[in-house]
Structures are given as C-alpha cells and as structure tokens.
Amino acid sequence: MFPRYWIGTSKGSATAQRKFTMAQLLKLLAILLLLPVIGAVGFGFIEHLRPLDAIYMAFITLSTVGYEVVKPLSDGGKVFVIGFLMVSFTSFFYALSELGEMLVKGDLHRLIKRRIMDRQIKELSKHAIICGFGRMGQSVAMELHKKGIDFVVIDINPERIHLAVQEGWRCIRGDASEDSVLDEAGIHKAHSLTTVLPHDPDNLFCVMAARLLNKDLIIIARSNADSSVHKLKRAGATRIVSPYSTGAVKISQLMIHPELDDFMEIFSDREADVDLTVVHVKKDVIFFGNRLRDMDLNALGIMVIGLKKSGGKVSFPPDLDVILDENFVLILIGRVARLNEIFARDLK
C-alpha cells in the first residue's frame, strides 16, 4: 500500500519525487527541540548554571558559532561538551537541512494542507466517494461539485491526485479496494460510492470491499463488458453503468430522432440552469399528504415527470390524483437554484 501522505510536484515520475510524511515532520521537530533540552539539562546539572545560561550554552554548542562561554568549564563540563557534540551535531544539522528543504520546496505547506484535508474528510457525513479519477471520474466529480454535494476522490495515480488537489477537492491516494483507504474516505458515513476504474476486476473488488464495510451504501459501478454486469450485481452494486451500452442507446436514439439532442444537452451542459433530480417523499417535504393536481408546481419552477411507489415501477406520466406519502419517490425537472433551495437537504 502507498504511504498515506504523498508530497511532491506534478512533474516527473513518482519514483523521482520525495515522500514526506507527518511522522517525519514530527520526528524532525522532536530532534530540534529535544537536543537543546538535553544540552540545557546537562549544562545546568554539571556546571550549576541558571536555566537561561544553560539554554544559551546548549545552543552555542550545537551551532558551533564559538561565542564566549558563560563561565570556564570544569573537566566534567568539557567531557559533556565532547560527548554532546559527537552525539547531537550530525542529528541537529540533518534535521535543520531536512526541514529547510521542506520549507524551500513548499512541502511543509502541502503537508499541512493534507492534514487539514484529512480532518475535513473525517467530519463528512452522507457524502459521495469516487473511486478512480480518470476522464469519467473527473466528469462525475465536476457534476457533484456543480450540485454542491460533498465527495472524496480515491486514486492510486499521483498525477491524478495532483489534479484533484489543484481543483481544491478532497482526495486520497491509495488502492480503492483496500479497507483502510475506504475507511479514511469515511465509507461508514458515506451516502454513495461510484467506482469508475478502467478495469472491471478492479471495479469488482472495489464493490465487494465497499459493500462489506457499509451494507446501506448506494454503489454505482462501471462495467466495460457485459459479462461483468452479473458479477458486479452479485458483489453488491446497486446500479451498473456501461459507457458503451449507454452510448450505443443514445446514438441510436439520435439517429432516429436527432432533435432529442437539444433536450439531452440541457442536462449535460455545465452552464445550464435546468437539472433532473429525484426526491423521496417525507413528512417534511412539500409533497407529503398532497395530490400533484392540487399543487401549483409551475409557480415553484418544478415539473414532476415520473412517480414511483416502493417496490413498483416508475409511472410516466405520474398519477396526478394519488395522495403522496413516504412510499413514493418523485422524478423532478426544474431550475437548479429552485431545486437546491427547496430540496437542498434531500438532494444531498
């Protein structure tokens, strides 16, 4: 498994880039703080110096700057200086040089940002997880970002993780089928997960790992081959998406009815102000206990195009006279701002 914290630039291969961890940073700081303390305690005990003088002696000894000593050293003090320098000199300047390198290259800043991101991920709840940050994963991330939905990206490729960091998105570098990586992404509190890795076996392992960790998770899996669909379903995927099958259906529709492209573009255009969404009817949702016929939805900028009852099929067009309760799910089309305003909590 790859180290949890990976710091480097986007250029060059991963093998040519250094990896700094929070543990290494803490180790360097411990060296820089502990050695002066040891020196101060030694000088204070052997030479009976007051604390400030003891700290002063420790620092001028470590730095070898050669300032005047507070008082002539005893034989015991001279032996302590020799031993202190032999043990601490190399370690002290090694820590200084490493910390200086981190500061010059900006690695310390990125490491702190990584730490902040980890805390943000731990605080997430009902968020989405995107496994794989290739072209499809990036498109999914962009759509979720546009809708204001919290998500975490997982990818094993450092260059793709760098892209996610540049966008300001929460991300983790690692194998998405590893339980520890999914745990770090907050899978136990997540609402949904999509695995859009390039190879079906990778997607299969990811689905199995995710389902074992969270039985209630909505899992959307990518399938490149028809033979993988059944396996992904048995592994625990909620829905399977095949880019080739979906693309073939759309192409055939456009061949017969090219005008449909104008309608489809409404939902694929990132600048469009119209969106399609699903809302579960609850007691605190405006639809609960009402009939669609009696509601002035046009005034809200919303249109109900589909209705589904638990365990049933989606009805198009919806029954306008049915009294809606918690067993119903609605498919809505409307302006993004109004959908977010009215159903912000339910859409997330």
Image (cartoon, rainbow, N blue to C red):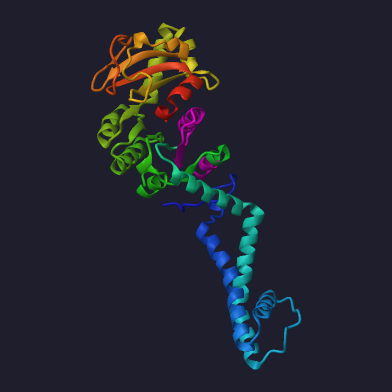
Residue 218, x across and y down, in percent: 33, 33
Residue 12, x across and y down, in percent: 58, 47
Instruction: Give the residue displayed 45% in from the left and 44% down from the top.
Output: 123
Is 161 part of what is drawn in magenta?
yes
Q: Is residue 168 visible?
A: yes
Left or right of 74? Residue 314 is left
Considering every residue shown, the one lying at the far bottom of the view is: 75
- Which sits in the foreground, 81 or 233? 81
Query: Up-down: is 148 above or below 213?
Result: above
Query: Up-down: is 331 above or below 125?
Result: above
Residue 75, x across and y down, in percent: 65, 93
Q: Quadrant of residue 223?
A: top left
Instruction: Give the residue displayed 45% in from the left and 10% down from the top.
Output: 298
Left or right of 298? Residue 223 is left
Magenta stretch bounds: 133-162
- Which sits in the foreground, 180 or 273? 273
Is 119 part of what is drawn in magenta?
no
Q: Quadrant of residue 176?
A: top left
Instruction: Give the residue displayed 47% in from the left and 34% down from the top.
Output: 134
Query: Up-down: is 203 above or below 111?
Result: above
Residue 116, x across and y down, in percent: 53, 48
Query: Up-down: is 111 above or below 144?
Result: below
- Which sits in the foreground, 267 or 302? 302
What is the total number of numbered labels drawn onto the structure image?
0
Q: Is residue 86 visible?
A: no
